[in-house]
Amino acid sequence: MKNIAIVYFSKTGSTENMALAIAEGAKQHGAKVLTHAIAGTEIIEGRFKNDALFEKLENMDAIIFGSPTYMGGPAAQFKAFVDASSETWSKQLWHNKLAAGFTVGGSPCGEVQSTIENFYILATQHSMLWVGIDAPEGTSSKTFNRLNSSLGVIGMVDDEGQLDGIDIKTAMRLGTRVAELVQRT
Ligand SMILES: Cc1cc2nc3c(=O)[nH]c(=O)nc-3n(C[C@H](O)[C@H](O)[C@H](O)COP(=O)(O)O)c2cc1C
């Protein structure tokens, strides 16, 4: 059985809902999934510290990154995790693992793509293999990937902080896709 980790930060729950949908999609396709929500208690004097998590991540076949978009990029809590991965980077311990990413924003643009680009750079620094979104229902689908992202899954909350069901469906599909592709590695 292949192992997929989903490492994310979420404050008000929408990014977490996307993470859970990705996990569900991956599990339905036979993967074992580790979800890790970054907690404030893991950040000490600005530095993320969780050695046990990094040990587990070494044994994953794929790692999926998620954060809300804050001010046009990942939240500081997620960036703290990214910075803590530098030791892993120096040893290239994530070499050739699959990687993917997801974010949630509050605006149709909101510079949310920048957050996914940030994850992509993280993945390539770690020599990981990036997985974007495919279009299983065709590129003109109105019921999948409504924000038409290719690099990663993007959700947008409404004024009540709620995600659209299509965003959840797209997130689930990313989990499925990563679970399918990881079988080939
Ligand atoms: C400090 C802060 C900065 C934000 N910056 C952006 C932004 O640049 N672009 C955007 O589209 N949404 C922005 N938002 C909206 C959040 O991305 C949105 O509320 C998201 O659902 C929060 O995710 P969560 O529910 O997982 O905590 C911001 C929210 C906060 C609190």
Image (cartoon, rainbow, N blue to C red):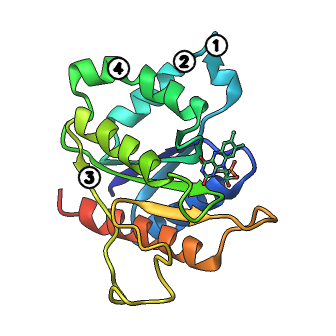
Residue type, numbered disc 2: Lys
Residue 122 percent across, percent down from the top left: 33, 36
Q: Nearer the viewer, mark 2 or mark 3?
A: 3
Q: Earlier in the sequence, mark 2 or mark 3?
A: 2
Regarding mark 4 in the picture, which secondary structure is present there? helix
For mark 1, what is the residue?
A: 44
Regarding mark 1 in the picture, which secondary structure is present there? strand
Residue type, numbered disc 4: Ser
- Few, some or many C-alpha atoms within 10 Å of disc 1 (few <14, some 14-19, many ≥20)? few
Question: What's the distance in space between the residues labelled 2 and 3, CA to CA?
Answer: 25 Å
- Would residue 161 appear left or right of 114 to someone viewing this image? right
Q: Earlier in the sequence, mark 1 or mark 4?
A: 1
Question: What's the distance in space between the residues labelled 3 and 1, CA to CA?
Answer: 30 Å
Nearest the eye: 102 or 33 = 102
State the residue at coordinates (34%, 66%): 150
Q: Earlier in the sequence, mark 1 or mark 2?
A: 1
Regarding mark 3 in the picture, which secondary structure is present there? strand
- Few, some or many C-alpha atoms within 10 Å of disc 4 (few <14, some 14-19, many ≥20)? some
Question: What's the distance in space between the residues labelled 1 and 2, CA to CA?
Answer: 7 Å
Nearest the eye: 111 or 163 = 111
* Picture quadrant where residue 95 is located: top left
Residue 170 percent across, percent down from the top left: 48, 73
Q: Earlier in the sequence, mark 4 or mark 3?
A: 4
On residue 130, the disc is 3
Residue type, numbered disc 1: Ile
Q: Nearer the viewer, mark 1 or mark 2?
A: 1
Q: Is mark 4 within 8 Å of ligand 1?
A: no
